[in-house]
Image (cartoon, rainbow, N blue to C red):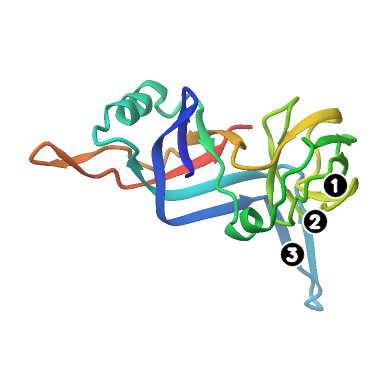
Amino acid sequence: MYGVYENGQVIGVFTAPLTVKSNQPVFVSDSLSLKRSRQKRTGQRWEITTGIRPENQDANDLFALFVEKGYTNPIDILMPQNTGSRHKRVRGTPPVATGSLDGDTIVVSTTSKIPRGTYIRFGNHSKIYLTLSEKSAAGVVKIYPTLQQAVVNQSMKWEDDVIMPAYIDLDTTVGMSYSDGILMDLGTVKFVEAL
């Protein structure tokens, strides 16, 4: 179950439809001969757009968190893993990773099977990465985006424990509608990764 995470539990569950988008600025230009040139920036963030419902019948915790954090403080999100990666993963020894700044590969030591398309996070920073290759034995794993910080023998989150600090997008109005005192709809919320 993925959603808004507080005090060790999910207090707001993501509902369908759910969209996870990688936002990385890309500049495209065409020459007179119509040859296309592309250049992408190094900055990247994840954006989640989803419906949300309180985990419990009362919505007090979720509503209070949104009011408290507002648009200026990050909220912890339990990152939704792709269904395919959840079904293909095999737990073994806890993974430990090493990689250099701006590198697009990491060396992982573990007996776990980490499928392609798995969201991961390292112990020394909060950026979320996506595996672009499968890891079934100790070795090299390709990741996206490139490493924002070097990792040296860092523990790695890769299952249903990847927490992403995120802001509520300024274009999203967060409110709740009630009917006869019962929560009816929290609406659609957009979260952007806190970098």
Residue at 63% x, 57% y is 87
Q: Earlier in the sequence, mark 1 or mark 2?
A: 1
Judged by depth in the image, the label closer to the viewer, 3 or 1, is 1
| Residue on which the image places disc 1 | 104
Mark-to-mark CA distance, 3 and 1: 26 Å
Identify the secondary structure beneath mark 2.
loop
Judged by depth in the image, the label closer to the viewer, 3 or 2, is 2
Residue closest to the eye, 63 or 117: 117
Identify the secondary structure beneath mark 1.
loop
Residue closest to the eye, 165 or 168: 165
Residue 145: x %, y % from top left: 75, 46
Q: In which quadrant of the rendered image does the C terminus lie?
A: top right
Circles 1, 2 touching at the beta carbon (< 8 Å): no
Residue closest to the eye, 151 or 2: 2
Residue at 74% x, 57% y is 116
Residue at 72% x, 50% y is 90
**Crowd band around label 2 with a 10 angstrom C-alpha radius: few (<14), some (14–19), many (20+):** some
Residue closest to the eye, 36 or 9: 9
Identity of the amino acid at label 2?
A: Glu
Identity of the amino acid at label 3?
A: Ser
| Residue on which the image places disc 2 | 134
| Residue on which the image places disc 3 | 29
Residue at 80% x, 56% y is 134
Identify the secondary structure beneath mark 3.
strand
Mark number, residue 10:
none
